[in-house]
Image: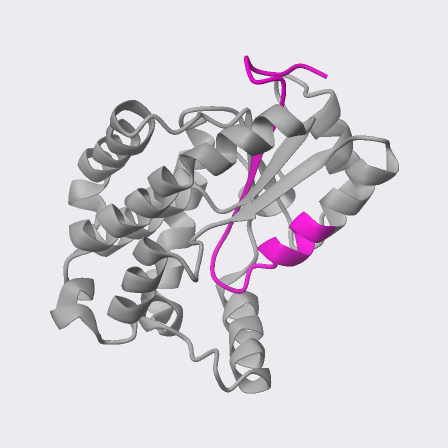
Amino acid sequence: MSAGPTGARLVVVEGLDGAGKNTLTTRLVAELDARGLSVGRLAFPRYGTLHADLAADALHGGQAGAADSPHAMALLFALDRHAALDALTGLAAAHDVVLLDRYVASNAAYTAARLGPDREAEVIEWIGALEFDRLGLPVPHLQLLLDTPVEVAAERAGFREAADPGRARDRYERDADLQAATGEVYRRLAAAAWRSPWRVLGTDPAVPELADLVVDPTPDPAPHPRSRGVAG
């Protein structure tokens, strides 16, 4: 299994709200653990911490309308990850694999979707330079895009809200057009192999095959049929 200077493989699971990222991450942790690998895990945003809670409050109408600014929200999410840098370093030092539920690409995808196609390249470049270059976040070895259809993801998010009255959907989660546009940006990021290799997955990916990819990555993993032409 190849690894970076820290010794761990840093693997990210990306996707829309309700895509099934948490479920996939949990299944992948179990599969890797069964193979005798030590796995660290972290999810972003880190609700319960300063920057993530400020962002959550903004997306529910607080913080003096900060959510009206795509750049302000992007900065809050970036600072949340920067505040976790020591935790990421510790996980990488202690484990064979570190799995992240969302990371920098989510910021790029949602912010670009909000700003529209004319500013997409500009804002993706800005976020990459901000988070990886200026804030010093580690670049992942592999990014997995769980390409769940928007309608399915929205239905799941609705079920989650109904099951937990304290988990009201935020401004991003309620915006179907934003979710659809974000999915398109995600696919373009994957096609461009933005910052590291990507693999595009269907709604119910084969977890053992994903574990094989994490343990022994191949140079050109194939995209799933819904994303024909998108490079992994």
- The residue drawn where x is 86% and y is 32% is 35
Q: Nearer the viewer, residue 105 or 164?
A: 164
In the rendered image, which quarter is residue 211 located in? top right
Q: Position of residue 10 (x, y in %)?
A: 57, 29
Q: Nearer the viewer, residue 92 or 155?
A: 92
Q: Nearer the viewer, residue 72 or 183?
A: 72
Residue 113 drawn in magenta: no
- The residue drawn where x is 64% and y is 49% is 202
Q: Position of residue 134 (x, y in %)?
A: 25, 26
- The residue drawn where x is 74% and y is 24% is 215
Q: Which of the image's four quarters has the N terminus?
A: top right
Q: Position of residue 185 (x, y in %)?
A: 36, 45
Residue 20 drawn in magenta: yes
Left or right: where 139 falls relative to 1: left
**What number of labels is visible?**
0
- The residue drawn where x is 55% and y is 50% is 147
Instruction: Name the colour scheme.
Output: one colour
Q: Which of the image's four quarters has the C terminus?
A: top right
* Magenta residues (range): 1-26
Would residue 105 be seen by someone viewing this image from the given angle?
yes
Would residue 230 be seen by someone viewing this image from the given angle?
no
Q: Position of residue 133 (x, y in %)?
A: 29, 23
